[in-house]
Image: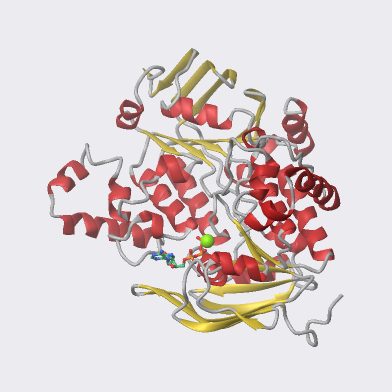
Amino acid sequence: MPDATVASPLLEMRGIVRSFGAVRANDGIDLDVQAGRILGLLGENGSGKSTLMKVLFGMLPPDAGSIVFRGRPLAGHRPAAAMAAGIAMIHQHFMLIDAMTVVDNVMLGWPEAGRVLRRAAMAARVREASRRFGLDLDPDAPVASLPLGRRQRVEILKAILRDAQLLILDEPTSNLAPSEVAGLLAILRRLRAEGRGIVFITHKMPEVLEVCDEVVVLRAGRVAGRTPVAGASPQQLAEMMVGRSVAAAPAPAAQAPGAVRLSVQGLTAPGLSGVTFALCGGEILGVAGVDGNGQIELAETLAGLRRARGGRITLDGRDITHASAAARVAAGLAYMPADRAHTALVRSMSVAENLMLRDSARPPYARGALLSPAGRRGRARTLMGEYDIRAAGPDTPAGRLSGGNQQKIVVARELDRRPAVLVAHQATWGLDPGATRFVLDRMLALRDGGAAVLYISSELEEVLAIGDRIAVLADGGFAGVVARAAADLPQIGLWMAGRAA
Ligand SMILES: Nc1ncnc2c1ncn2[C@@H]1O[C@H](COP(=O)(O)OP(=O)(O)OP(=O)(O)O)[C@@H](O)[C@H]1O
Ligand SMILES: [Mg+2]
């Protein structure tokens, strides 16, 4: 193992500054990455992680600071130059052509490869790298046929074949099923064993403990701390990250549930095979399960974005089985979709407009809409303060906010409506631990105010933390439902695996 104190680092970033208007996203950051090490880059939402990596990869010019990579200065560069120097960035939204095969995607945009290596030779290299790193990729498979985790591996494969010495992964696990996460972490270990350096951005402490050699924590654009992972406790790391002690989640007080607010009987749709449950006011039903077992289908059918083929949905006694999405919203249903980028936000619209998106047609914002734009901005500012949405201002386009802060817009908008029923799907996607806790607490408060909450998440811990009852979705139906007090982890695991396998 290289000695960090003696070996000169693979990467040295010094005094990086980058502002967006009044926001100093990076405020003088130093970062070193060693060869053969995995560096965890942590920090709360909006602390500057993605910005720093975009500067490194040449997607954003810094206002000040210097970068030295493998002993050579890197300045005024674009991504193509970063790649040529040996840096690869694994994007969250993969830059792959679905209709093409794995090997064709690898060759795409890599003219040198096309000139030197014929397709058959490249396919052989794909096979060899796939075996060596445990990627399990067939060069001739069309990308469209691959699940998310495999597509990500195509991106990693591209980096390996281009001989990248430093790989940047910005929240690579947030969209993956648990088994895919384990696979990715194993691949990262093999890359490390070959002496490559890795920057790994995540909000998930277990992942940090499992693969990172050291962590650097950013807070408000500065380095707030760095520490080797060996010897640090999860509690210490979490506190470094949040900047205060993170209290263990208090068990929510038991409630006497009220009347049934959402009733679902024998709901069928493509991907749903007869889901039945009744959800009362003052109650949270946590829905656990491996992604891809009907979660999206259930959430979207309840929200009115997919049509039910059979069964019945009632909200406060009203049949809404065939009601439009807008009619459901008007009836008191709130919905937080997992697919933030496409369904929940209009990226080109301002933070303020996104916050009012659902309510422009009803009080108080119907009146608000008649108010001056300044009035609406004021309302937006209040919500931004309450939900800690970090942006230059209410007029900033939502797409410019950090990932976690975009998610907070969705959460604020849906919770602020005080809905009768909330359907939340991956509500804490991309949120840091402090923000996650905050959102869970707000959902508990919503419940305590008499609302019914359906909390669908692949994070079993969260489901167990706030569900009054726990249901497990497997193969399009509930494999089991149990009161939290009676929840038995091995049994839940069996439900998750049994019908999911
Ligand atoms: N293109 C942009 N225009 C305006 N502001 C931006 C832009 N990109 C980032 N910011 C702001 O810079 C700050 C840092 O954002 P960044 O995306 O680096 O945070 P992050 O640490 O990656 O957060 P997250 O954990 O939510 O992904 C945030 O306040 C963000 O709103
Ligand atoms: Mg980010």
Please provide percent x and percent y for residue 90: 62, 56
Q: Is 455 drawn above or below residue 91 in the view shown?
A: above
Could you tell me how many numbered marks the image carries? 0
Q: Is residue 308 visible?
A: yes
Quarter of the image where one finds residue 288: top right
Q: Is 108 drawn above or below residue 211 in the view shown?
A: above
Residue nearest the observer in this picture, 479 or 223? 223
Q: How is the image coloured?
A: secondary structure
Q: Is residue 364 visible?
A: no
Identified at 44% across, 80% down, the residue is: 63
Identified at 41% across, 47% down, the residue is: 410
Identified at 71% across, 64% down, the residue is: 164
> Which quarter of the rendering shows the C terminus?
top right
Please provide percent x and percent y for residue 480: 68, 26
Residue nearest the observer in this picture, 163 or 347? 163
Please provide percent x and percent y for residue 228: 75, 75
Q: Is 33 drawn above or below residue 380 in the view shown?
A: below
